[in-house]
Image (tube, rainbow, N blue to C red):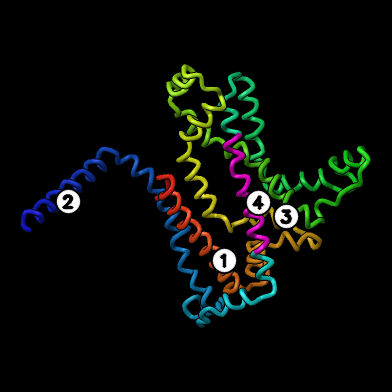
Amino acid sequence: MRTARAEAHVAEKTRGYRIKKNFQRNWQLYVLLVPAIAYFIILHYIPMYGVQIAFKNFIATQGIWGSPWTGFDHFTRFFESYYFWRLLKNTIILSAYQLVLFPLPIILALSLHEVKKTMFKRWAQTLTYAPHFISVVVVVGMIVIFLDPTTGLVNRVIVALGGEAIPFLTSPDWFRHIFTWSGVWQTLGWSSIIYLAALSGVNPELHEAAKVDGATRIQRILHINIPSILPTIVVLFILNIGSFMTVGFEKVLLMQNDLNVSTSDVIQTFVYQTGLLEGQYSFAAAIGLFDSVINITLLVVFNYLARKLTDSSLW
């Protein structure tokens, strides 16, 4: 037993010595980490102290500690409300719609990687990256202009081809399609960058050997490129799952109107309305906490499944 303790003590001292030497050797890198760590601590972890207002009847003049506890009353009120299932349904459908299109950046990256003409490749990358730098407000403004029932380019083409103008922006059936595909147009190129970076690390000798064996381009993509970037795909998929219930409310809010609210009303827009517009801070905090708990649960579950099935995970 003494020998085991002595060995453990030596191992601990050795590990501490290695950590110290590593810090001394790479102290500049640790210094560069300080702003990022400070950012998350100050703006993400410390504010979690305020989550407790979800279990209180928050009164601004009394502060967080002075406000009376209400327990799970706000959660019960939300779960029993008539709009709960509509909000949950709209949020899940919109998030699932976007998640189904998750492979599109992968397909784009694989396609661009196979392009041999440098000029065309640069032109295609610039064309697909550019929409990322357009603000959400401008994108929605473009959608309104192009889809206007009377003066919009899309409806003019439809009418010219013998059809009838479609009120896209006031139709609940069209809202999800417009929201999702406009988002794909805006983010597709930018999302493919990380996959292109991963593809650039694939060993060219693997492709050369495959060519010698008579493998076609499709076979090399399926059996070399995709397996090589699979860990990256898995990690990004897990991160997407971790924000499954978080539909950015800015774009939804800008596209929302009284006629399409039946499909455009999601949890985030409801939190904005009840919390900021109506001043029901505790109720809004409870809804937001409910949303975050679902996201965390999905993140942990899918990370566990990914680790078991693919040996790639966040932790």
Q: Which residue was labeled with disc 2?
A: 12
The CA distance from mark 3 to mark 2 is 57 Å
Q: Is residue 314 visible?
A: no
In the structure shown, which secondary structural element does the residue marked by tag 2 occupy?
helix
Residues at circles 1 and 2 in contact by the CB criterion of under 8 Å: no
Residue 295 higher or lower than 232, as above or below: below
Which amino acid lies under the numbered mark 4 shown in the image of this protein?
Answer: Tyr
Q: Residue at x 10, y 56 (%)?
A: 5
Going from the N terminus, do you reach mark 3 or mark 4 first? 4
In the structure shown, which secondary structural element does the residue marked by tag 3 occupy?
helix
Name the spot of residue 298 as percent of width and height, x first. 50, 58
Residues at circles 1 and 4 in contact by the CB criterion of under 8 Å: no
Which amino acid lies under the numbered mark 2 shown in the image of this protein?
Answer: Glu
Q: Mark on residue 254?
A: 3
- Viewer-closest of 238 and 306: 306
Going from the N terminus, do you reach mark 4 or mark 2 first? 2
Residue 151 higher or lower than 171, as above or below: above
Going from the N terminus, do you reach mark 1 or mark 3 first? 3
| Left or right: where 92 falls relative to 14 | right
Name the spot of residue 69 as percent of width and height, x first. 50, 81
Q: Residue at x 57, y 27 (%)?
A: 218
In the structure shown, which secondary structural element does the residue marked by tag 4 occupy?
helix
Q: Mark on residue 288?
A: 1
Going from the N terminus, do you reach mark 1 or mark 2 first? 2
Q: Residue furthest front?
A: 214
Q: Residue at x 57, y 31 (%)?
A: 110
Residue 45's quadrant in the figure?
A: bottom left
The CA distance from mark 1 to mark 2 is 43 Å
Residue 101's quadrant in the figure?
A: top right
Which amino acid lies under the numbered mark 1 shown in the image of this protein?
Answer: Gly
Residue 243 higher or lower than 312, as above or below: below
